[in-house]
Amino acid sequence: MFRPMTSSTAANQRHEKLYVLAQCVGWGGFTLIYGGLALFIKGMSLAQSCVFIATNICGLLLSHLYRMWIHRRGWKQLSWPALLPRAMAAMLLLAILWTAVTWPLYLLIQSDEPRKLSVAAVFLLSVLNGVWIYATWSLLYFGYNIADRYRRSEVERAQLAATVKESELRALKSQVNPHFIFNALNSLRALIDEDPARARLAVTQLANLLRYSLQSGQLETVPFEDELRIVNDYLALEQVRHEERLRLRLDVAPETLQLPVPPMLLQTLVENAVKYGISARSEGGEIAITSRRTNGELRIQVINPGLLPEATAAVASARPNGSTGVGLRNAAERLRLLFGERAGLQLRAGGTDTVIAEAIIPLMPAKHPPVS
């Protein structure tokens, strides 16, 4: 039965191919360079060349067995302090074993030649030579694996951060969306007995709100024009309760209509303005929505009548510990997650008896098509 290849299996195959290539290039290159120098400088004979090649083949096989031991003992997962003494002991043992295995071949080619050094000295030099060769092999092997492990941990960390970000966005959306649905349903309930024709229109507007909420919940950004259209439906429903007490003024720059904003951002600001600027005042008032594109930023302002309490008089920053309520805190947090630290949501006094909620959004290409 066919089984699809997983990313882990593919990565293991790539590592195996790279290991085989590195072994061939490393030991082959060492044999050619070192043997070539010995051949031209010392005039190494054919028999000595064959012994030298056979010796390096033994070294290659021992390094492969060393790798198998590393895998079996899990040395690649060890830290440097734990790995270093093990690797040093393994290098010395491999060098001794390599010398012992190839020692008969050395004695064979040196049997008829006068010895300048004692047998013990030659054996010791051979061991030292093996130690530095396996030290170089170990440094390259463990260095690559540590670098690869670090790279994979960075990829996993980035994937985890993206997952956390997506989870946070979904959680914040789920907290924002029910607010406007609840208010819209209350408005519709008040309208049904008074004006059936207008109630039917309100049902259509409510349907638009619900459809937009469901569709935009899957998106990170929507065009600002879509937010304006839905806010008009929302305010039409709110005007059923407030009638002439609720007035709307729009001052929207045309170049801002297609710029991306988080879904339900404007509705959250307008809902806050209705709740604290209109409902709380017997005479009602005007809600003004303005948008401008300046200095590489989209600035959206919602202005409503009212006084800003001293506890929240400075700034409702893009941090969840602000004191502006759940809706505005979540809107500020969504701005920060989507657009970075340059984005923010400010709540401030706007002069005589007015409050300004301003969203600051760094300009970026829209990620999603508009919600129709």
Image (tube, rainbow, N blue to C red):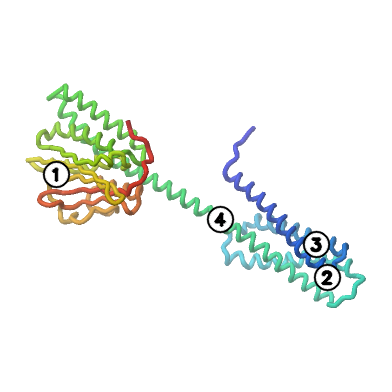
Cα–Cα span, label 3 and label 2? 18 Å
- Which residue: 81% across, 73% down? 122
Cα–Cα span, label 3 and label 4? 33 Å
Q: Say what amino acid the circle numbered 2 marks.
A: Lys
Between discs 3 and 2, the one toward the N terminus? 2
Which image quadrant for residue 278?
top left
Q: Residue furthest right?
A: 112
367 to the left or right of 61:
left
- Which residue is label 4 attached to? 149
Which one is in front in this view, the residue at disc 2 or the one at disc 1?
2
Q: Say what amino acid the circle numbered 3 marks.
A: Thr
Q: Are marks 3 and 2 in contact (CB under 8 Å)?
A: no
Q: Residues within 10 Å of mark 4 (few under 14, many from 20)?
A: some
Cα–Cα span, label 1 and label 3? 89 Å
Is residue 271 visible from the viewing direction of this image?
no
Q: Residues within 10 Å of mark 3 (few under 14, many from 20)?
A: some
- Which residue: 19% across, 54% down? 312
- Which residue is label 3 attached to? 55
Q: Quadrant of the C terminus?
A: top left
Which image quadrant for residue 67?
bottom right
- Which residue is label 1 attached to? 277
Percent x, y for residue 234?
21, 34
Between discs 2 and 1, the one toward the N terminus? 2
The secondary structure type at the circle numbered 4 is helix
